[in-house]
Each structure stands twice: as C-alpha cells, then as structure tokens.
Image (cartoon, rainbow, N blue to C red):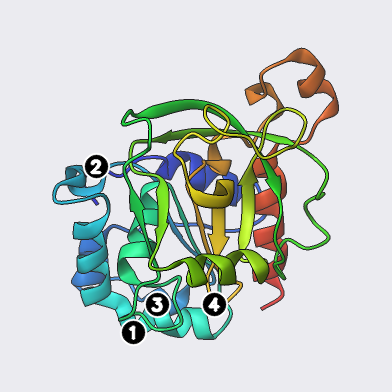
Amino acid sequence: MEGTNNDTEALRSLRESNLDPSYVHIHEIEKNKVDLEDFQVLFIPGGFSAGDYVRAGIIFAIRLKTAAGKKIEGMIEQGKPVLGTCNGFQVLSEMGLTSSDMDKRELALDVNESGKFECRTVLVKYSGRNKIFDGKIPRDQVFEIPVAHKEGRIRFTSESVEKEYVENGRAIFTYVDPEGKISGYPWNPNGSPDNIAGISGHYDNVLGLMPHPERMFYRYQLSTKGKRENSVPVGKIFFGAISDYARRL
C-alpha cells in the first residue's frame, strides 16, 4: 500500500526467524493474484498508508477488508498469526480484527496526548497472557523498542472494555520506565490507558502493537555497549516466538 514502510525490516526479521516471507501488495490481493490462504502468517507493517488521509489506516483497512476480509477471518479462526505494528495496528483496529465481531469495533487509535509525532526509543515489558509468547518472553525484563507515530493512543469504546482487556491479559505489552514501573510521559509516548503498548484480540493470534519489534532485531540496534553484550533484542524474541508458533500449525 502506498505510504507503507517497515516492510523490509519485517521481511528480514521473519526470514531470519526461519520463516519464508513474501512481499504482497494490496493490488495483488484485489486482483486475485495472491491467495492469503496460502500463508501461515499475515504481517501488516507500519508507515503512513494512503498518506493517513481521513485518519490513520482507514483507507488501507477498507481496501483490505473489501478484498480479503473473509479470508483474513478464516486465517484467524485457524489460529494463524495476524499481526500489525504501528500503522498495521491502526489497520487491524479499523478492520475490527481485535474484536470478536469485525462489525463491532472495541477500540481506535487516537492522536498522542502530546499532540506530536513521537519518534524515539521507549521501554516495554511483557505484561499479558498469550499462548504465542508465554514462556518465550521474560516477564521481569525491560526491553528497548522504537516508536514512530502520531496516532498511537488507544481509545476503548468503554471503561468496561478496557477493564476486560487488562484483566484478561490481552494488554500484552506495557510502556514502563527504566525500573520497570508504569510511568507517564515520556515513558508512555502517547497517553494510552494503563500504559498499553500492544494488545491481543479475542483470539490470541491477533496482535497489534504501536512499537516496532522489527526495528529492534539485532544486538547492534541496542543503545549501549552493555546492552549489546548482555541482552537479546525484543524483536528477535518476538519474531522467534511467532515462528515457533506458526511452524507448529
């Protein structure tokens, strides 16, 4: 889709995690040149699809839902991972894929509380429950991860929906400070409630994140020598878990 980026980083991360990814353009899906049923994983990368006109992700979401909505629902029901980071998360949200019913959206991504485009490294922890990541991502470890968005503040349709996400472990990643505690801006770059950085849908295999694990895959991307020598980047763990899960399907 015009304006999408991070596709190269995502492709490389998936490939180096022992998967065999392919670039697929929305035109190929619309013209039936590609069948999504042939794939085990769907990853929608970040960027500014269609220039984020109207609102972030909506044009891409409408086109993808029209062209392949039922097939994507089928992938989800089969347990295949359907992922979106940054603009990809916005697309998943606009399609209603994080909800139990695609026609009844539970959340949207709004403008950051700062009113600014936030492009920098933040810190997150794995804080939820998810069959893909449980046992793969340490719960007590603080990870560096980049963000680059202006519309990343999660807005739930009601407080009860927000509570359900948090209490059921669907708020899988949380923004934290260096001590691993929930803190406000700048540690929470967008003002999302409960410092939520990423969620899973009603199905564990639907995952939406505002940060970019595909941009933190290699040790040299970590900020300090100590971290580069002693830490495993969150992207390597994240995509490794996706690969392990997908290869078992």
At label 3, which amino acid type do we have? Ile
Identify the residue under disc 3. Answer: 72
Q: Residue at x 44, y 38 (%)?
A: 190
**Cβ–Cβ under 8 Å for marks 3 and 1:** yes
Q: Looking at this view, is 200 or 195 the one in front?
A: 195
**Cβ–Cβ under 8 Å for marks 4 and 3:** no
**Cβ–Cβ under 8 Å for marks 4 and 1:** no
At label 4, which amino acid type do we have? His
Q: Residue at x 77, y 30 (%)?
A: 179
As drawn, which residue projects farthest toward the top?
Answer: 225
Q: CA distance from mark 4 to mark 1?
A: 17 Å
Q: Residue at x 64, y 58 (%)?
A: 172
Q: Is residue 45 visible?
A: no
At label 2, which amino acid type do we have? Gly
Q: CA distance from mark 3 to mark 1?
A: 5 Å
Identify the residue under disc 1. Answer: 70
Q: Secondary structure at mark 4?
A: loop
For residue 214, what is the image quadrant? top right
Q: Earlier in the sequence, mark 4 or mark 2?
A: 2
Residue 27 drawn at (x, y percent): 20, 62
Q: CA distance from mark 2 to mark 1?
A: 25 Å
Identify the residue under disc 2. Answer: 3
